[in-house]
Amino acid sequence: MKSSKMKQTYSRVVVKGGVLSPAELKQILELAESAGLDTISLGSRQDILFIKDDGNLEIDSQDKFQLVSPEELGAENIVSSYVSSDIFPNTPWLTGDRYLYILEQFRVQPNLKINITDPKQRLVPLFTGHLNFIASAHEDYWYLYVRLPEWEETMMYPALIYSWEMAKVASAIEDILQEEPETVDFLFELVNDAVDSNNRTVDTPLEVPFYPFPYYEGINRVGDDRYWLGLYWRNNKYYTEFLKVLCDLCADSKIGKISITPWKSIIIKGIPENTKIEWERLLGRYGINVRHSMLELNWHLPVNNKSALKLKEYLVDNFDKRDISTYGLTFGITDYTRKAYYFTSIIIEKNQPPAGLEGVKIRNTYNLLYAKNFDPNTQQYIVYVQEVDKAELPGLLIELSKMYFEQLGKKQEQSKKQIVTKETIHSEIFQCSDCLTMYDPTYGDQEQNIPANTSFEELPAEYHCSLCEAPKSKLLKKTISKILK
């Protein structure tokens, strides 16, 4: 088998969907050890990092795993909320097995960032990809929210995507990038010209319910006879020796998958009750702490950034001394050198040094931003303060935390009032009585060369259901209501 060697300070190991088998993880750990490492780290897109601070990192992967250098552009890991299935709120049809079947469709490593998520969970962000597939209420159909690399805003694709065509649609969009589509409607037309698809009409807008951020650590019961385990290291340095023993215990417990979260933690699901004592013994033998404060767990930091870690420790220590609760909130630290899509409730943004003073030692200043309604899924961030000193941050963050709790109980009541005042429009669609596929005159039917804005009466007599080919007479009129945002 061909051998590939890479020399750099750190390397990413792609872990599709953030899920891998214990045997695969053990092989990755052995690969790290062969490169002289005794720890691995985790990335924000559910990948694994090999980091070496002193000297070059030389890895002989023998092509078993896809290794990506820090400088390489385009090779992106697929993020999924598989980790949340069966342990946190979920869309009923979206089971763990369904995620695995869908991920298997992606045979080629994508160049775009792809997220595959359930809107009912909070652990994995929904909108941090270029292509964000979000489960709908219709079984095996997904909303698609697109934010291509050059786009300023996220736009909703005007059709629901079928589970078994997600990889095909994603690949088509990547191929279309050279045509530089500027709108989602133009992208929709290009994709429909490029591939045959079993799309479905978007009959209701996406609703993302608000849940407080979950506690994701320790041994927790799920169901009558199963447990799940969450592991978190505050310095993001996971010892290979411990993890190899953990992989062996997974195999002994007949656990087939291990999951990585975007919060740089590990979750193991499906631990049988009769092996729980073995897991407790393993944690105790290696002195593993699984009871960190929520003050520590709800932070997202840049990878391998010591100054960000030091700032977090300073702020958490201040919260702890003042007995401040941040349950349900999440915090992110970023700086001017990193362009990323935010996915935390509150952002601490480090400012760029003044021009011409880059080499002069001056005190850092920060901006504070918070998500609208403290919900990062709104994708709207509000500037709270700018250019403040580090010493001012604890008090300002406590003010924001109090704002969050003050509006928390009022949020549902406010949202109801907003819905009443929003404009509601009614439109007619025609639904097949056999398979429930819908014909929406607004979009027409690309598969049968029916242009948009073609009324049902204008359809030819030979028109039939695009899915089951039932005759036109089987399509029955329905009126649907849509609330304008």
Image (tube, grey):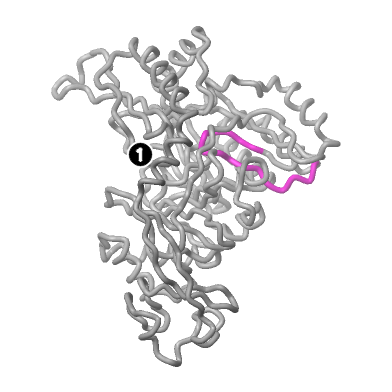
Of 103 and 153, nearer the camera is 153
Residue 413 in picture, x, y percent from top left: 46, 35
Q: From the viewer's perspective, is residue 337 above or below residue 460?
A: above
| Helix, strand or loop for disc 1 | loop
The disc labelled 1 sits on which kind of residue? Ala
Q: Residue furthest top?
A: 321
Q: From the viewer's perspective, is residue 353 above or below residue 425?
A: above
Q: Would residue 90 be found to the left or right of residue 375 on screen?
A: right
Of 248 and 342, nearer the camera is 342
Q: Are there few (<14), some (14-19), or many (20+) residues within 10 Å of tag 1?
A: few
Q: Residue furthest right?
A: 274
Residue 25 in picture, x, y percent from top left: 64, 43
Q: Is residue 36 visible?
A: no
Residue found at x 48% / y 13%: 319
Report the label total. Answer: 1
- Image: magenta residue range: 253-267
**Quarter-wise, where is residue 306 in the image?**
top left
Q: Would residue 45 be found to the left or right of residue 62 on screen?
A: left
Q: From the viewer's perspective, is residue 348 above or below residue 429?
A: above
Residue 5 in picture, x, y percent from top left: 48, 46
Residue 459 in picture, x, y percent from top left: 39, 86
Residue found at x 34% / y 50%: 154
Of 97 and 204, nearer the camera is 204
**Quarter-wise, where is residue 121 in the image?**
top right
Which residue corresponds to mark 1? 340
Residue found at x 49% / y 28%: 409
Q: Is residue 117 visible?
A: yes
